[in-house]
Image (cartoon, rainbow, N blue to C red):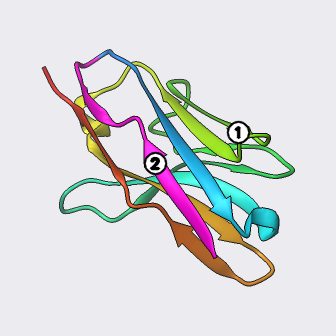
């Protein structure tokens, strides 16, 4: 089992910044990919960015150049730095961890990000 705990969401004005954190614990040895997804009301959950243990990061086209995903392996934590936020970035943001050997996806509880003036 893997536990994911997100933090860092909140209310921010357009053009502002937020940093989300996702701390992983438990049986994390088999996790080879971590990422952030988001879901706005009435919309499907969508990939924002992900970062593999080895390899290149991926970003949704809508956040390229504004968001940056990173990880601190010593702390088992993944971050999402969000800059130049727009109202359309408003959503619940979920941390995800992919366990390739067991073909299982873990999810955090979600953190609300609201971009509004």
Question: Considering the image in quadrants, where does the C terminus appear?
Answer: top left
Residue farthest toward the bottom in the current orientation of the protein: 102
Q: Which residue is mark 2?
A: 6
Residue farthest toward the front in the current orientation of the protein: 26
Residue farthest toward the left in the current orientation of the protein: 117
Residue farthest toward the right in the current orientation of the protein: 54
On the image, which quarter does residue 42 sit in? bottom left
Question: Considering the image in quadrants, where does the N terminus appear?
Answer: bottom right
Secondary structure beneath label 1: strand
Find residue 43 and report its horizontal and vertical position in percent.
26, 61
Q: Which residue is mark 1?
A: 71
Instruction: For label 1, count other residues whose C-alpha is less than 10 Å away and answer few (under 14), some (14-19) or many (20+).
Output: some
Describe residue 7's horizontal placement relative to residue 60 as left or right: left
Find residue 30 and report its horizontal and vertical position in percent.
80, 70
Give the mark toward the camera: 2 or 1. 2
> Which residue range is magenta in the image?
1-14
Question: Which of these two is toward me, 5 or 60?
Answer: 5
Q: Main secondary structure of the magenta part?
A: strand
Height in image: 34 above or below 15?
below
Question: Which of these two is toward me, 2 or 11?
Answer: 2
Find residue 104 and report its horizontal and vertical position in percent.
64, 80
Instruction: For label 2, count other residues whose C-alpha is less than 10 Å away and answer few (under 14), some (14-19) or many (20+).
Output: many
Describe residue 24's horizontal placement relative to residue 89 as left or right: right
Q: How many marks?
A: 2
Describe residue 94's horizontal placement relative to residue 71 as left or right: left
- Identified at 42% across, 41% down, the residue is 7
Numbered label attached to residue 17: none
């Amino acid at each position: 089992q893997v536990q994911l705990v997100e933090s860092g969401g909140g209310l921010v004005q357009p053009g502002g910044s937020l940093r989300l954190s996702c701390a992983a614990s438990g049986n994390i040895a088999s996790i080879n990919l971590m990422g952030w997804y988001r879901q706005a009301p009435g919309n499907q959950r969508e990939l924002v960015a992900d970062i593999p243990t080895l390899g290149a990061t991926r970003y949704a086209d809508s956040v390229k150049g504004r968001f940056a995903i990173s990880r601190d392996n010593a702390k088992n934590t993944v971050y999402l730095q969000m800059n130049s936020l727009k109202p359309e970035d408003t959503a619940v943001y979920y941390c995800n961890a992919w366990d390739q050997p067991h073909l299982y996806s873990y999810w955090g509880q979600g953190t609300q990000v609201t971009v509004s003036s």
